Image: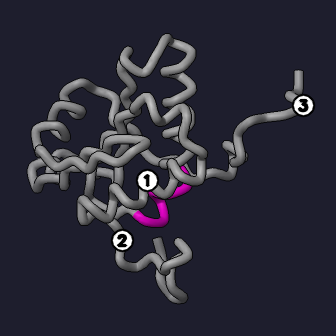
Amino acid sequence: MPRDASACLLDPAVAPVVPRLKRRSEFLRVAGARRKAVVRGLILQARRHAASDRNSGPVPPIRVGFTVSRKVGNAVARNRARRRLRAAVELVMPAHAKGGHDFVVIGRAETLRRPFAALVADLKTALERLDAIDEGAGKDGNRTQGERL
């Protein structure tokens, strides 16, 4: 049965997919790096891929994990916060994040109340604070002419 309307701005078939962190050990590795940026709508943790990670096979240039604790609300609220964070990451990370990093995006109570544009701006600000923003992206978010992803 086709859906009449969708809250998602991006078509999943067209949107770039950012590889995910799934195992607890991967989340703990990122947290152990102790690099984080706290902004109003989210917390972003980052870890640069180690040489030992690269030797165990091909490592994606960027991997992202999401977590939202029970402090944010019930299961419905946590899932909505996670969906909003995933949408923001799909917009920002492919164009702005430096390759060779793992990121964990932590939802906060404010994640649910922030306008989506402000949430996207929060993510960009967090990347800048962690010095994980790609210098190749222009001010408007597009790569300069002649550069590839």
The prevailing secondary structure element of the residues shown in magenta is helix
Please give left or right for residue 57 compared with residue 119 in the image.
left
Q: How far is the residue under mark 1 from the one under mark 2?
A: 16 Å
Seen in the picture, residue 74 relative to 40 is either above or below; the reply is: above
Residue that sits furthest to the bottom in the current view: 146
Q: How far is the residue under mark 2 from the one under mark 3?
A: 37 Å
First along the sequence among labels 1 and 3: 3
Report which quarter residue 66 is drawn in: top left
Percent position (x, y) of residue 91? Answer: 55, 55
Q: Amino acid at mark 1?
A: Asp
First along the sequence among labels 2 and 3: 3
Residue under label 1, please give it: 122
Q: Which one is closest to the eye, mark 1 or mark 3?
A: 1
Q: How far is the residue under mark 1 from the one under mark 3?
A: 31 Å
Residue under label 2, please give it: 134
First along the sequence among labels 1 and 2: 1
Camera-nearest residue between 143 and 41:
41
Camera-nearest residue between 61 and 74:
74
Percent position (x, y) of residue 100? Answer: 26, 59
Under circle 3, the secondary element is: loop
Residue under label 3, please give it: 4
Q: Which residues are drawn in magenta?
A: 90-96
Report which quarter residue 83 is drawn in: top right
